[in-house]
Amino acid sequence: MSESNVLSLTNYWQHYPDTYRSEEVKTIAGWLAAGESGVIVGLSGAGRASLLSFLHHRPDVLHSLLSDYSCRGVFVPVDLINLPDNSLATLYRTILRSFYEVSYQFDSTQQAIIYDLYRKTETSRDAFLSQSALRELLLSLETEAYRIGLIFDRFDRFCETATVRMTNTLRGLRDSFKETLCYLVSLPQEIIYSPYWESLEPLRGILDSHTCWVGPLLEKDVRHMIAHRTKHLGEPLPNEIIESILEVTGGYPSLIRVVCDWWIENREPIVSLASNKWVARLLSLQNVQHRLEQMWYGLTQEEQSALSELHKWQDGQATGNSAKYLRSKSPFPLAEPYRNLLPGLQNKGVCYQDKQNKCKVNGRLLASYIAETSGRSRGKIWLDSKTENIYQGDILIGNLPPLERAVLGFLIQNPYARHTHTDLIEAAWPEDVHKEGVSTDALYQTIRGLRKKIEPQPSIPCYILNWRGQQEGGYHFFPEGRPIQ
């Protein structure tokens, strides 16, 4: 990267305060110091990419956080999405190129080594040569007590086409340099919900122990974002406008951008900013609806149901078991099973505790969107051990044909595991049936019937999912309803 480009990027990120995303940055810096890999997860619009760019472009912040450790840390972003092919030689050369592009963050000795090794293998298609060059570089960095964090943004998109051999190679590389190398993987949802199970599997053991959730911005970061986005106006926005934008958006970066731009164009009077009319106008905008929809579909069906119940409680519309919690002093007002989900929803930033220590939906736009989607979520599928009845949320799933009942019962008792077609046939078909004669199509028709009854969109299943692998493939079951995106 040319010096002018480096300066341009550095200047852009310098306007961010040193305390930007301070809790998340501190957490990830701690991973780097300890040589641990992890996953950065956040709903759509939370700003995962901005956080990772800040980590890379503000080495001064990282250095201050690592000052108590006897190591030097560098974050190296690696673009695995735009690989020209899936060869190992290309993978190694891409990582070497990434070091070359951020070589200015290393001392002069390491810069010379990086430059020399990259140039020697820049055009080589020999995987052994590029692998040897990369290992030589990491050995050199290990000697100088560097901690390297390779940043893989949108790793899910890489896994769409990555081979198991490629992710095995990444795992082997990290295992060879445990004291030097760690991976920061950005995903839109937890690893367990990844649709690219096979390609991601080799890395699960080093990634699923550490997760950093990226949620809404803190107020100080919201104020900075709004000030930067509106600086061309020549004067700062009135405090009342900033507070209204925060109240309406809940601090979500993607919503802040849209609302700021909308306000600049319309210049609504301050008195009407937080009114229901203003919220309704924003909610009618296609770009606002799209962002809220992306956030909503990033939640499980069970989480959506819990958030809907929380909104009803917030509006005084709770019924049934949740109604008795209306006057409760508990910060988590809902009845079981939703009550236990609220701390996790707080981590994702879709609800928060107010000054009275009550849990509420985060942002008036999201609350209004939830009111519009009320009743669409299905909830968790579970078996009542006393009655043997199967429920979806609090709705009884009745009148299931025997085979559908048997298959669903088996899946409920064995969630998350990948079951082959043969496993399901052997578990669900009656003992007096010659199971070797049961066709895969018979199982498919049974699954199809179940999906019509339990899936919000049978063509885009979130409870019973196909998986392909080994010799026959099969299905795996998410009782809470996996996020769609």
Image: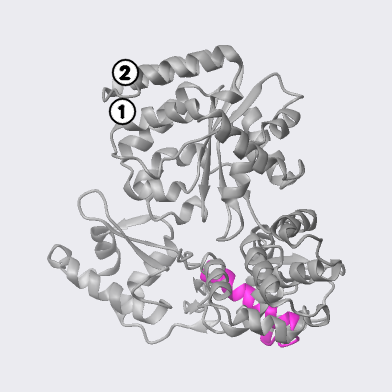
Please say whether residue 282 is visible from this viewpoint.
Answer: yes
Residue at 50%, 22% (x, y): give it. Answer: 177
User: Which residue is at the front of the view, 250 or 243?
Assistant: 243
Please report the bounds of the magenta region as a residue range. Answer: 300-320
Say left or right for 460 vs 176.
Answer: left
Q: Is residue 472 above or below residue 202?
A: below
Please say whether residue 56 is visible from this viewpoint.
Answer: no
Say left or right for 381 vs 212.
Answer: left
Q: Amino acid at mark 2?
A: Leu
| Disc 1: which residue | 89
Residue at 59%, 42% (x, y): give it. Answer: 53
Q: State whether the magenta stretch is mostly helix, strand or loop.
A: helix
* Residue 75 locus on image (x, y percent): 58, 32
* Residue 419 locus on image (x, y percent): 32, 57
In this view, which residue lies farthest toward the left? Answer: 437
User: Which residue is at the front of the view, 297 or 101?
Assistant: 101
Assess whether mark 2 and mark 1 are in contact (beta carbons under 8 angstroms).
yes
Disc 2, SS:
helix
Disc 1: CA contacts within 10 A as few (<14), some (14-19) or many (>=20): some
For the image, the number of numbered tags is: 2
| Disc 2: which residue | 129
Quarter of the image for residue 406 reads: bottom left
Q: Is residue 143 above or below residue 36?
A: above
* Residue 477 locus on image (x, y percent): 40, 63
